[in-house]
Image: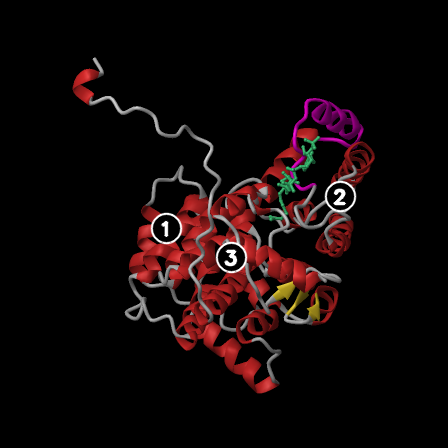
Amino acid sequence: MASAIIKASQDVIRGKGMEPHMAEQQYFPGLEGIIAGETSISTIEGGLQYRGYRIEELARDASFTEVAYLLLHGQLPSQEQFADFKAILIESSEVPEPILEFVREIPLHAPPMDVLRTGVSALAHFDPQCDDDSTDSNIARAMRLIAQIPVLIAARYRYIHAEPYVEPSSTLRFPANILSMIRGTEIDALDEEAMDVSLILYAEHEFNASTFAARVVTSTQSDFYSAICAAIGALKGPLHGGANEHVMEVLEEVGSPENAESWVRTALAKKQRIMGFGHRVYRDGDPRAEILKTYCRQLADKAGNEELEQIADTIEKVVLDEKGLRPNLDWPSARLYHYLGLDVELYTPLFVASRVTGWAAHIIEQAENNRLIRPRSRYIGPVTLPFTPLSDRG
Ligand code: CMC
């Protein structure tokens, strides 16, 4: 039954067996509920799974680096494959000096997501085979980006905060390395684990807006970097990845547990969207949010600061009561990054540091089995207007 519906919807999209005007009548704002392609990278049916592995198990037992391998190669690595993969990531982490210089010289007011997009775009010029879209080349450049994006984020951040550059480490694990390049401090085990889990949870989420943007660009046979830059642009928006930064602004504005209930009721009465709540494809709650919340509690406990958790609990309860909406991943992520001592401007770039793995897997999948993504629109403008030559228009 489901496959018949999918087939019918594909036929409608291709206008097969129908008059053009019939195809035009099928319209789903925001493509809601539309199957826009096939993937074997992840599914949300029956719980979120990457390549067939449940997210709960990956978050508990795997590392982000292992998940990156899984997403790129389609299977879990053997110990030897994993050792090679980690070694290549370490070797690839050196960002060409001219790019580091360039990224530092961008005007200080530029938003970090824009700087990151520019940095990734500039990296394309250092890839002599930029237009080679073979799977091996795409995996190699994906690994370079996985290794270099954290360096770009941290180098720019420390430069604008007048802190000395911290080189990537060849001994730290991936999540500790990111934190140490940004903070310039040693990283304890709980901070490292919390960061690792957040990177795992952010890594992949089937046809979300940024991934879809990357697939659209790839479908035109454009290059890998152009697709990633499009994805970064899409992720920046507050309805997508940009939400995690806005969540923190809300929590800061609320300020105290006593203020939380009245703040959220007033905001909802004014029809304000509460960032970090609701989801296009999870109507009963985002399973990733529950996993990350447990780390928020542990980190709040370690810091001896429960206030933010109390504010969050109150807002969650009121939004559920009033709107029936549950938190998405960006809701606990904001608190988690705050407890990890990270500034708000880093939150969405850190989402990129993780999601680049999923984007890369989708670019590879799209390129391997490509069909140009080119939907139709329903025209709602005027037709057959009488044309008046410019000379007669006064
Ligand atoms: N706060 C208040 N009301 C909301 C919210 C929210 N966060 N989300 C949805 N609604 C309401 C919306 O106003 C509408 O109400 P009504 O029917 O009375 O007009 C109803 O719920 C349906 O909203 P919608 O915009 O049609 O639903 P959607 O499926 O397009 O929305 C969403 C999905 C994520 C854009 C939306 O829930 C939202 O804007 N959330 C806040 C931004 C956010 O947290 N984004 C992160 C998304 S998940 C992780 C990621 O991709 O980064």
Secondary structure of residue under mark 3: loop
216 or 181, nearer to the observer: 216
Q: Is residue 182 visible?
A: no
Q: CA distance from mark 1 to mark 2?
A: 35 Å
Examine the rendered structure and indicate whether residue 221 appears above or below residue 374: below
| Three-letter residue code for mark 2 | Arg
Which of the numbered marks, if any, corresponds to residue 118?
Answer: 1
Q: Which residues are magenta?
A: 255-277
91 or 2, nearer to the observer: 2
Secondary structure of residue under mark 1: helix
Rendered location of residue 377, percent (x, y): 47, 43
Mark found first going from the N terminus, 2 or 3 = 3
120 or 227, nearer to the observer: 227
Is disc 1 in contact with disc 2, using a CB cutoff of under 8 Å? Answer: no
Secondary structure of residue under mark 2: loop
Rendered location of residue 359, percent (x, y): 51, 61
Which of the numbered marks, if any, corresponds to residue 326?
Answer: 2
Question: Crowding at label 3, few (<14), some or many (≥20) Cα neighbours within 10 Å?
Answer: few
Mark found first going from the N terminus, 3 or 1 = 3
